[in-house]
Image (cartoon, grey):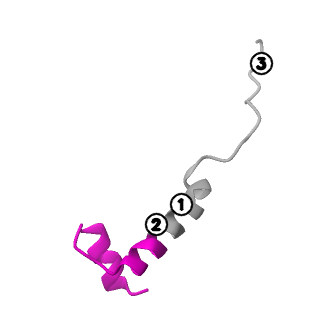
Amino acid sequence: MSYEAIDDFLEGLPIDREAERIIVKTYLASAHKRHAAVAPPIARPGL
C-alpha cells in the first residue's frame, strides 16, 4: 500500500481494486478507535 494510492483514494481518483479493498477493510476494522471510550457517569454532589 502506497501513500500515493491512499491520496488518490481520498481525492476520489481511480485506484487499483485491491488497494481500495485494503483501505476500506482497514477503515472498518479501526472504527472502534473513532468512538469515545466507555466510562461511568460523573457523580455530581447534591444530585
Mark 3 or mark 2: name the one nearer the start of the chain. 2
Residue 1 place in picture, x, y as percent: 43, 86
Q: Quadrant of residue 23?
A: bottom left
Image height check: is 25 above or below 18? Answer: above
Q: Is residue 30 left or right of residue 18?
A: right
Q: Quadrant of residue 9?
A: bottom left
The residue at the far front in this view is: 17
For the residues labelled 3 and 2, the Cα–Cα distance comes to: 46 Å
**Mark 1 against mark 3, which lies toward the viewer?**
1
Q: Is residue 1 left or right of residue 38?
A: left
- Residue bearing the label numbered 3: 45
What amino acid is at disc 1? Leu
Q: Is residue 9 left or right of residue 33?
A: left
- The residue drawn where x is 35% and y is 77% is 6
Span colored in magenta: 1-23
Q: Which mark is residue 18?
A: none
- The residue drawn where x is 48% and y is 75% is 22
- Residue bearing the label numbered 2: 24
Please tell me whether residue 14 belongs to the stretch shown in magenta: yes
